[in-house]
Image (cartoon, rainbow, N blue to C red):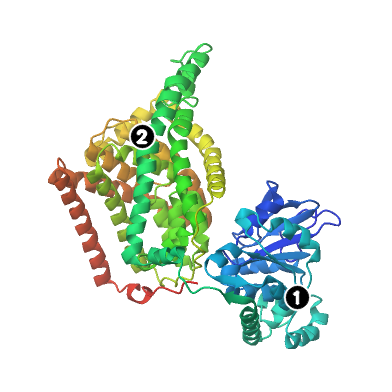
Amino acid sequence: MSHCHGCSVKIDIPEGARRIVLAGNPNAGKSVFFNYLTGMYVDVSNYPGTTLEISYGRWEKDVVVDTPGVYGISSFNDEERVARDVILTADVVINVVNAVYLERDLFLTQQIIDTGVPVLVALNMVDEATKQGIQVDHQLLSQLLGVPVIPTVAVQKQGLEEVKQQLSQARRGHTDGHLQQELDKLINRVGSRGEALLILEGDAAVAERHGLQPLDQREAIYLQRRQRVNRIVGQVLKETSKATSFANSLSRMMIKPLTGIPILLVALYAMYQIIGIFVAGTVVGITEETIMIGHYEPAVRSLVGSIISEDSILGTILIGEFGVLTMTFTYVLGLLMPLVVGFYFFLSLFEDSGYLPRLATLVDRVLTGIGLNGRAVIPLILGLGCVTMATITTRLLGSERERRIAIFLLGLAIPCSAQLGVIAGMLAAVGPAFVALYALVILAVLVVVGTLMNALLPGQSSNLLIDLPPLRFPRLNNVLTKTGIKSYQFLKEAFPLFALGALLISVFQVTGILTFLQNALAPLTVGWLGLPKEAATAFIMGVVRRDFGAAGLADMTLTPIQVVVSLTTITLFVPCIASVLVMFKERTKKEAAIMWLSTWVIAFLIGGMVAKLSQWLGVSTPFEVVSVIGAVWTLAALTILLVRFTKKTPLSDSSKSGGVA
């Protein structure tokens, strides 16, 4: 077992094998190259000292290592530190460059070349560049850089085989003469051209490895590199058309509030119609009622019942109302799986089309009001898939303050895909007015809690700096692959937790604990929330998984307002066990405990307020439902105004959104 010197990630490198490293800017398409080269033989390791993961796999006898998307290799953030250390240990670097953003991407290319590592450039997305009237002379670019340049369209697998064939031709490229002289002076002292470069650029971490002081030539080197890249781009790039394509026009419409909000509403309406109506109604009707309840459960009860009595303790645990072999399989495969697949299909469509970063740009100014910036929309949307995964992705946010706000809001007000699917199915049966009541109550909680945290926590939001990749038609193969992988990950995670939850509830049932808890929680569930006593079971199950609790509510007979109250409470209720564990991992134990306990209080407080307002104002007509919505948002507005009046918030300073690359 050998390992990356400097990067400290243990990777098995066979004797005589090369370490091939993939490097590039965000959204350049590295993952497609990585998957093409490694296939399914992929391992993941945490980079020591960070929360980042490094993917690596085999190609023939060589090892391919992926790096985070970065704009440079230095010590500005964890991503750059990881990319720097892995690249400096490479035998060959495949630098994936986006042809649409050539001027931006070549800065990293030239920096990697300056380290002295053999490089091959994959000039990716040349089809997108052509559509936008951009042509790149890749042969001239190869001459100017001094390394092979292969034009590719990775998603169509064009040029990927040539990249494989040309890997042996990777070589050191051209470096500016003055920089070369400076490197020659230092290289004998550190023994590595790459580390000599980074010491010249003022990288303190690399300088410390050699007992040296970092030099202060970064600004001069960066300026010289930028000028060199600009000259190269001026020679190799030709704009063939000034015409604005439909994709460019649509892209601009997506990020302007006047047109972007209607586009977002159309996308959300399409999701609701397909997931909330078609999947939750028709598809789940077949998978849950016809297949699982109609055929699977009778078969498994008959089989197990022939061995042990269904009324026995073991029979109740295995095939009873909350049986491990009955409820677990019915809920996961019959109810949740179709809904999860539907949600991940839409999420993959948004990712593959390039819509997600445009959505981030659209909502940037809104999110600054709750202490975040537009980049936070990515974990918030991912939270609609899996809050646990989304909590981990809050690492991409620019400050501890933003991570703290985002993690709490994810745990509080963002339902995961499985829970959202059940919610959509239940709301589809109660009418648009009650759907609006549920959605606007959750939104009000999100805004008020975010505003309070923005006011109470020190600091302010960082500016938004994000790439807008080309807008394109999603590729069905990519979308189905992503959907399949994410759905399988959900299935792998959900089954053991649901089985644990079913076992727990069944044990509670046969021991009488369930009845005791239902009675103990009756003042809350019946008196405060106005729900049946049995709703306590759903909340108990929700501690294991929130979607488990939501699925428990789906089996109950509730009035429309009880549906809204119960779903509001279960949405704001504590995150599932997996999310709580990640929360404790990402934050301090004290902070995570406060967040966890706060969700209990807020969930029952808001659920009860909606129930009482509905009793006082009545909800027999859509107009009366609107009056409840008005009352909720009036209280929310008064709270926000009070916060801003009593404590100066950083909102006015932080509302200036950053640039968009």
Residue 429 location (% of width, % of height) = 28, 36
Q: Is residue 291 above or below residue 477?
A: above
| Residue visible at 42% across and 37% down in the picture | 548
Residue bearing mark 2: 281
Residue 342, position in %: x, y?
Answer: 45, 42
Using the image, determine if residue 15 lies above or below residue 640: above
Residue 284 in view (yes/no): yes
Q: Locate residue 530 relative to residue 286 in the image: left or right.
A: left
The amino acid sitting under disc 1 is Gly
In depth, the one of 180 and 174 nearer the eye is: 174
The residue indicated by pointer 1 is 146
Position of 284 compared to 23: left or right?
left
Q: Label 2 amino acid?
A: Gly
Q: Is 204 left, or right, of 638 in this rendering?
A: right
Element at label 2: helix
Q: Badge 1: few (under 14), some or many (20 or more) residues near its Cα, within 10 Å?
A: some
2 vs 1, front mark: 1
Coordinates of residue 91 in the picture (x, y in percent): 78, 64
In this picture, residue 534 sits left or right of residue 110? left
